[in-house]
Image (spheres, rainbow, N blue to C red):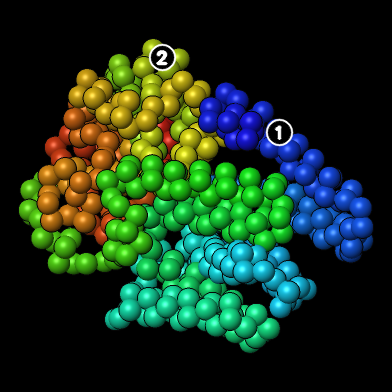
Amino acid sequence: MLGIKYLSSPNTAKQGNLLSMFGMAAATGITLATPGLHGFNLIIIGMFIGTVIGGYAAIKVKMTSMPEMVALFNGCGGAASALVAMAEFQGVGIGLNSFTLITLMLSMIIGGLTFTGSLMAYAKLQGLISTRPITYPGQQFINGAVLLVTVVLCWFLFQDPSNILVFFAILALALILGVLAVIPIGGADMPVIICLLNSYSGLAVSMTGFALNNNALIITGSLVGASGIFLTKIMCDAMNRSLANVLFSAFGKVDESAADSGEAQTGTMKGFEIEDVATILANAGSLIIVPGYGMAAAQAQHATRELGEYLGEQGVEVRYAIHPVAGRMPGHMNVLLAEADVPYEQLFALEDINDDFDSTDVVLVIGANDVVNPAAKTNPNSPIYGMPVLDVEKARTVIVLKRSMSVGFAGIENDLFFMENTMMLFGDAKSSLQKLVASLKQ
C-alpha cells in the first residue's frame, strides 16, 4: 500500500516500485516458508521460468511498446486467478461450501474474461488485428445471451458442484466473453479498456483470495481492483463520456455519414518545408509541445527533448501539454518523455495549460490528432463532440508534424489542419525533428 502511495508522484515513483517489489518478495517468501507446502520443487521451477521470461521482456521491451506489455500483464493476472480457481475446484470439488464456490466461479469468470480480453487489447495495440471497432449485426444481443447462459450454468454448478462439464463450459464462455467484449472497442478507447482490464485482474485476484482464505491476495486484489476502477472513471471523464458509451458505442468505427455531417472545410491544408518551420521556431518567445501517439510510433521522444532543450537554451519558454488520453494507455506520453529525461516541471495537464494557448507564440503538435481537433467544441454532429481537447488553435502559430493526411482514431478530418495559422510538416516525426534541430543550429 505504501508502494502504491509513492507511485502517485513522479518524484517518489522509483521508491514506490522498489517498495512494491519488496512487499511481493516478502509475501512470496512467507508463502514458500509455510509448513507442509506441497509441490515446492515445481513452484521454484515455475518461479524461475517466470522470472526469466519477465526479466527478459522488461529489458527488451521498448518504451513505445509499454501499453502492449501492460495489457499482457493484466492478462497474466487474470489467467493466474482462473488457473488457481480451476485447481482449487478440482482439488476440493464437492466439499466446497457455498461462499467458496461462489468466489471460485467469480474468480474463474473474471479471470478468464480478463485473459482473453487483454489478449485482444494486445493484438489491437500491436496492430495484429484492426484497431477499428469490429462490429456485426446483433452483437449486443449475442453478448447478452452468452452472459445469460454463463449465469444459468453457474446456477447449475452451484446445485451440483461435481458436474465438471458445466465447470469447463463456464470457463469456455468466460474466455469467449473476453473476446466479444473487447473487439468492438476502438483504438482510441484503449486507455480506458486497459484501466478496466487492470481492475478486472485485481477483482479476480481478490476473489481467489476469498476462496483460499488468503488475506494478502484479498488486500492486494482489492487495491488493484479499486485503483483500476478509479482510473477508468478518470479516463472516461477526460473524454467526457460514460463507461457504457466506451463499451457499447463502438467509438472509432468509420461512419461516413457522421464524419461528413458537419460543415464543409473552408480552409486549405498547407504543407511547409523544414527551413520555414525552423524560422518560425527560431523567432518564438514561447513554445508549447503537444505529443501524441505519432511521437510514440516514430520513437521521437528523444528528438523531441533535444529540440525543446536547444530552444530552451536560446531563451524560448518551452512547455509540454499532455492530454490525459493521448497515446495508448494512461500516462503514455508522460512515460515516454520521462524516459527521454524531459524535466517533469515542463509537463502540464490539459486543465493546467489550456488557458495559456492564446498567449503562446508557437504550438508544436507531434503526432496528435483527435485530442487537438476543434470539432470537439464546434460540431455537434462530430463523434468526438463534447470531449475536452487542447485549445491549440488559439496560439499565434500552430505547427503540426504528421506522417500523412490520414485521419485519427475517430475517423474524421481535423479542422485544425485547415486553419489559417496552421503549418503542416509532413514526414516521419523523428526525422523531421532531427532535421529541425540541425537547421536551427546552422
Query: What quarter of the picture does the C terminus occupy?
Result: top left
138 with respect to 434 (left or right): left
Q: Which residue is painted at 39% across and 12% down in the image?
A: 315
Task: Note whether 64 is above or below 176 in the view shown.
Answer: above
Query: What quarter of the picture does the N terminus occupy?
Result: top right
Residue 367: quadrant of the picture: top left
The secondary element bearing badge 2 is classed as loop
Task: Indicate which disc, 1 or 2, sits on the residue closer to the N terminus.
Answer: 1
Residue 382: quadrant of the picture: bottom left
> Which residue does the numbered mark 2 point to in the structure image?
314
Q: Position of residue 259 (x, y in %)?
A: 18, 60
**Foreground tag (1 vs 2):** 1
Task: Note whether 139 is above or below 384 in the view shown.
Answer: below
The secondary element bearing badge 1 is classed as helix
Q: Residue furthest top?
A: 315
Task: Note whether 364 is above or below 11 in the view shown.
Answer: below
Indicate the amino acid at tag 1.
Leu
Residue 377 or residue 227, whichever sits in front: 227
Residue 68: quadrant of the picture: bottom right
> Which residue does the numbered mark 1 point to in the structure image?
18
Q: Which residue is painted at 32% across and 59% down in the image?
A: 244
Residue 334 visible: yes
Q: Position of residue 217 (x, y in %)?
A: 68, 50
